[in-house]
Amino acid sequence: MGAAADRDASAGHQVDGWVERVKDALAGVLRNGGDPRLEAVAAADCYLVGSYADGRAGPGSDLDVLAFTGEESGIEGVIAPLAQGRRPGPGESLPTLAEVMSWRATDALRNMEIELVGPRGRASRETDLSFWAFQMEPARLLHAGWGGGEAYRAEIAERFEAVRPGMASSSLVEFQHRRNQAQTALLHGQPLAIMLTSALAVRAAMRSWLLWAGRPLPSDKWLPSVTAARADSAPLMALVESLLDPDHPAERRFQDLRTLRQLLDEHVRGAGGDPGALWT
């Protein structure tokens, strides 16, 4: 077994462990009651989502549970049944990074947040179908009270796959525009514009890389790590790191942007696409 396979197996064991811990904690919360909102949770299909479901959780990670209901519950906001100590309320934030890290560093189960998601909430999330598919793919069932959750997850996967080819084509065009802007910024020599346009170009490249590989898109905070986790992405990520280096020489940056296009073209051809038909 190679190093990558070892890491995948380790992450899988960690996810399984967390699923059991959260499942037990949720069962205890529902059994003990005390909050009338938990009746709606008990009637829902509850899923562990986010970094604890896909093996990327760290000390600052949220522990998120989505509770899918068949009908609207009328309950807004999140339920934090095991919370202790100071927490930011609705519309609030803790004033310093140190306080946020201290709050997040407590036992993760204490930070479990349950959000009830009815038909309207799911429809709202479906407006960004690729990101919603990314969230739904690794989601782990903790409690079955509704019974429609698994069919819904399968529907989201099918709908994403139906639109993915068009998204992939559009993403390559988007990359072209961003790359052209990054190269043009070099002519003007403005450091902030160079860094901004380079960052937008590599973001577009990573998103296109994933879509042409058949993958849904994570949020930007996970985009580099999700892309880097792919076995075929090492040359891409080497260019990403170079282009995000503020001390990268202008001529080298220009050449790296050219190489980035060539690399993405090869990736698209490997996926059965024709990049030449998409360049304008």
Image (spheres, rainbow, N blue to C red):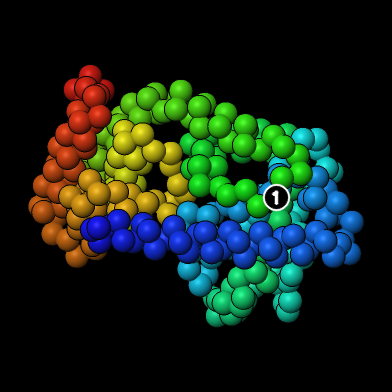
Q: Relative to the observer, which residue lies in front, 65 or 207?
A: 65
Question: In the image, residue 270 lies at what x, y percent?
Answer: 20, 31
Q: Relative to the observer, which residue lies in front, 192 or 122?
A: 122
Q: Is residue 42 above or below residue 2?
A: above
Find residue 4 and report its image quarter. bottom left
Question: In the image, residue 190 lies at what x, y percent?
Answer: 25, 55
Q: Relative to the observer, which residue lies in front, 152 or 242?
A: 152
Question: In the image, residue 115 lies at what x, y percent?
Answer: 71, 52
Quadrant including the N terminus: bottom left
Amino acid type of the residue that numbered disc 1 sits on in the rendered structure? His
User: Badge 1: how crowded within 10 Å, few (<14), some, or many (20+)?
Assistant: many
Relative to 37, is 52 on the left or the right? left
Relative to 259, is 77 on the left or the right? right
Q: Is residue 139 above or below residue 82?
A: above
Question: In the image, residue 222 lies at what x, y percent?
Answer: 42, 54
Find residue 128 and report its image quarter. top right
Relative to 223, is 78 on the left or the right? right
Dot 1: what SS? Answer: strand
Residue ID at (51%, 32%): 157
Residue ID at (78%, 50%): 41
